[in-house]
Amino acid sequence: MSRHHILSISFVLFSLFRLSAQECCDWPTLPESDQHPSDHPFSVGINQSYTRMDGLQSGTHSVSQKSAKYEYGMRPLKMTSQRVEVDASYTFTPEYQLGISLPWVRNTMEMQHYMTDHTICGEMGYYMKLLQRNGIKYKMNPVDGVGDLIIDGAVRLLDEGTPEDGQHRLYLRPGLKTPTGDYKAKMTSSSNNGSETIPYWNDKLHIMKMRTEYADPCMQPGTGSWDPLLQLQYHFQEGAFGTSVIGGYELTTRNPLGYEYGDVASLGIFPSYRPFRRVQLTTGLRYRHVEKSDDRDGKYTDTKNLTTDPVNTGGELTDAILSLDFFPLDNLVLNVGLSCPLWSDLNGIQQSPGNLYTAGLSFRF
C-alpha cells in the first residue's frame, strides 16, 4: 500500500476522532477520507452528518417522561442536529500538514412543559381548572448558523518499515477550536398560538407567561471559547490490513457569558481493511469521558428546564464506528459512515445518545 493510502487512513481517523464539547447533541462526525501524495498537496472536502435523540437517560438506564416530569417541568421530547462541514488541508512535506474545518450547524428541539393540576387565575380574572395529563408540547424554532472553526496540524514523529512488510507511524496532532460560531442565539418556540417566545410558569402570579432567552448550550451553533486540542495517533499497516490507536484531549475554556463546556478525553482503536484498490472499510470503538459543564454566571441556566441545568451534563460514552470509502478517481474520495452508541453513563438526566449518519466527499489537487 502506497504512502498516500496510509495518509488517507490517518486523515479519516483524525477527522472521525475530532472532539466536541457539546456532547448532549453534537456527536463527532465521520467525514470523508482523503489522500495526500506529494504531487497533490492540497485537499478540500465537504461532509454532512445527522443525528436524532428522542429518549431520556440517567446513568446507564433509560428514564420515562413521566418520571422526569417530577424533577423538571420542561423536558425535551426530540432533538436533531445537522452539520455541513467544509475541510481544507495542505501537506507541506510528508512530516508536516496543516488543515482547517468550518461547520454549518442546524439544531431543532421539541419540548414538553408539565405543571401539576392547578386552579389558575387568568390575566382577565377568570378561574379555570387545568388538567394537563402529559403536559403542553411545542416545537422550538430551529437554531442554525456557522459553527466554530478548527485549525489543526500534524507532525509525523515516527516512520519505520514498509506497508508490505509492516509499517509503523506515529503522529502528533495539535489543534485549536476558535469561537467563530454564535453562542448567544435566542431560543423561540412555535406553540399552538404561534408565539415567538418560550412559555414558562410563574409560580408567584399563577399565570402562564412567555419569554425569550438564550438557546440551550447544546443548541448553540458555537461555544464562544478558545479550546486547545491535542491528539496522538499510532498507525500500523501491513498489506491490505491496518490498525490505528488514537488518544485525544480537548481543554475547554470559559466563554464571555461565563459558560464552560466540560473537558473531553478520548481513546479509540480502529482496524481497517482494503479488499480492493478503490474500496476501504474502517471500523472501531471509541471511548470518551466528558466533564460537567459550568455556568458561572447562570446566564444559560434554568433549573426547571432539564436541558439548561448543568447538573445534566458530562459522563462517559462508548460508540462503534463504521466508515466505508470509495475511490472512483485517483483524486476523488466518497465516504459514508455510521456511529452507533454502545454504552453510556450520563450525569443527571440527559437525552440518550443517538446514531450518527454521515456522507461526504473530498478532492485533492
Image (cartoon, rainbow, N blue to C red):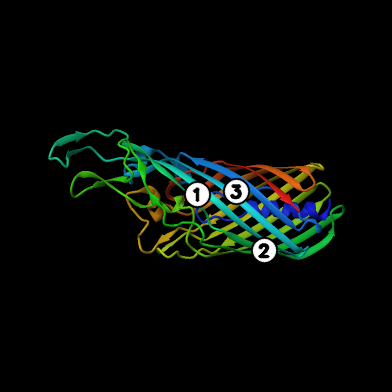
Circle 2: residue type = Gly
Front disc: 1 or 2: 2
**Left or right: 106 in relation to 11:** left
Q: Looking at this view, is 125 or 68 the one in front?
A: 125
How far, Cα to Cα, is label 1 from label 3?
A: 21 Å
Q: Secondary structure at mark 1?
A: strand
Residue 23 placement (x, y as % from top left):
50, 52
How far, Cα to Cα, is label 2 from label 3?
A: 18 Å
Residue 92 placement (x, y as % from top left):
75, 64
Crowd around label 3: few <14 · some 14–19 · many ≥20 (10 Å): many
Q: Looking at this view, is 193 or 13 the one in front?
A: 193
Residue 68 placement (x, y as % from top left):
36, 42
Residue where numbered disc 1 is placed: 345
Q: Secondary structure at mark 2?
A: strand
Residue where numbered disc 3 is placed: 29
Crowd around label 1: few <14 · some 14–19 · many ≥20 (10 Å): some
Front disc: 1 or 3: 3
- Which quadrant of the view contains residue 167? bottom right
Residue 347 placement (x, y as % from top left):
44, 52
Crowd around label 2: few <14 · some 14–19 · many ≥20 (10 Å): some
Q: Compare marks 2 and 3 and give the one earlier in the sequence.
A: 3
